[in-house]
Image (tube, rainbow, N blue to C red):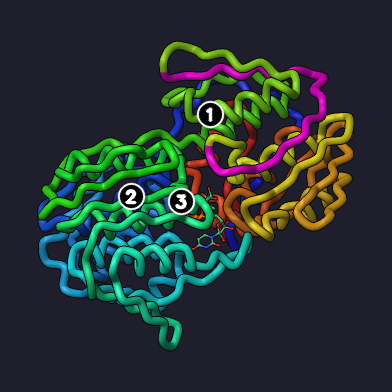
Amino acid sequence: MNKLFIGGGMRVRGRVRVSGSKNATLPIMAACLLTRKECVLHQVPDLDDVKVMEDVLVSLGARVKRENGTLIINPENITSYELPEHMSRKMRASNLVMGALLGRFGKARVSYPGGCAIGQRPMDIHLKGFRELGYTIGEYYGYIEGYASSSSDCDIMLDFPSVGATENLMMAAVISKNNTIIRNAAREPEIVDMQNFLNRMGAKIRGAGLDVIRIEGVNELNGVEHEVIPDRIEAGTFMVMAAASGGDVVIENVVAEHLVPVTAKIRETGAEVIRYNGSALRVLGKRKLGPVDIKTLPYPGFPTDMQPQMMALLSGVEGTSVIVETIFENRFMHVNELRRMGADIKIEGRVAIIKGKNRLRGATVEATDLRAGAALIVAAIGGTGETVIDNAYHIDRGYEKIEEKLRSLGITAYRIMT
Ligand code: EPZ
């Protein structure tokens, strides 16, 4: 049993340093497969999901060494282009190796990644893009098989700005005699980080961060060193904790630009967010916050990965807030658990109507997925009494040393392993 104990009724105070971004690290680790040369990645967070991706690379024949926050990846002796089911089912993001394997070897065989608590998470946009890139893609017995069968310049229009599909197609297109355009591309900061990493390897990519990405194919890529960007969702989570508890927190190692949609919504509640030199934000909660309406959207809209945490905050704020979740079809798993803490939330399809009231109450609750677990921490801190969060391993997938960081901010937090 893996439980997290959180004491409520305390104001979050102090300074916390954000780790490297999980969602930048995972695709960049996959992109290391595109070269035979050693790559060195810095500011890599020590997370369960990163460990799974390390295992994925090793299962393909790469050598991976971790030295504190640095990963040394040597993909010289990749022996396989097949990702078995037991690997693929461990984590959805393992499907990111498909684009890299196609890009390097011209073939790949990857078991369908399972869905997860928040949605089916299909790969149709990835596969349609691979086909437009000239790969023959077949689906047999739960596996997706692809191999290079034709090659020409192509101009791809994504049906939805899928983050993973954009990353997979960049990796599948970068080593080529042809040029590729990806339209309606995802614009997340993690896509820009991947472009910067690939260009440092010798790729010729332009436009990441906008909706049209242009790739001039090159013959081969070299090994490089790269520092991944800070984790904007971890930063946003600590910002919400400070607002929810009437606290005062300086969050270090942030790119304030990446947090503009989150900052705007937190300010709208009445909390104060101050840019605190180039790479830190200071958040001052207020005793009396107000309700806000939120609609999750692809970047630069409000991020779906911050929706559960904001719902936890708004559940403890007097007034009615409305949250519309447009990205995932089942990302309200945290609602039942918040209700156990006294939250008054009504769900109508993808719309949540939150009748906020003062202070939630501590309870025994269960994390159902990564950000739902983070939301329960926010609710516990902003509420009164003690909370025990079961299945806390979900939280460890995306938050490095979470109880240490909470304790450094004055929160009573410890792990109960039985
Ligand atoms: C990435 O997932 C992130 N994960 C997610 O973070 C994040 O929530 C998501 O982007 C949206 O921002 C990583 O980067 C490792 P999508 P991804 O493809 O790439 C549908 C977290 O908590 N879709 O942009 O899987 C899909 O079902 C995680 O850190 C298709 O229909 O997200 C979803 O409804 C959770 N067909 C929507 O698009 C496809 O082929 C967005 O998915 C692909 C996606």
Image coordinates of residue 339 in percent, x first then y, are 83, 50
- First in sequence, mark 3 or 1: give its number: 3
Q: Quadrant of the N terminus?
A: bottom right
**Residue 181's disc number:** 2
Dominant secondary-structure state across the stretch colored magenta: loop
The structure residue drawn at horizontal position 15% and vertical position 42%, both measured from the top left corner, is 224
Q: Quadrant of the C terminus?
A: bottom right
Is 193 in front, or is 90?
Answer: 193
Residue 409 falls in which quadrant of the image?
Answer: top right
Q: Is residue 7 visible?
A: no
Identified by mark 1, the residue type is Leu
Question: Cβ of disc 3 within 8 Å of ligand 1?
Answer: yes
Image coordinates of residue 198 in percent, x first then y, are 23, 45
Badge 3: how crowded within 10 Å, few (<14), some, or many (20+)? some
Residue 322 falls in which quadrant of the image?
Answer: top right
Count how many numbered circles sit on residues in the image.
3
CA–CA distance in space, label 1 to label 2: 28 Å
The structure residue drawn at horizontal position 20% and vertical position 43%, both measured from the top left corner, is 204
The structure residue drawn at horizontal position 67% and vertical position 26%, both measured from the top left corner, is 266
Look at the picture and state if 253 lies above or below 71. above
Identified by mark 2, the residue type is Ile
Query: Magenta region: which residues?
Result: 279-299
**Residue 259's disc number:** 1
CA–CA distance in space, label 3 to label 2: 16 Å
Q: In the drawing, does residue 309 fall left or right of residue 405? A: right
Residue bearing mark 3 = 163
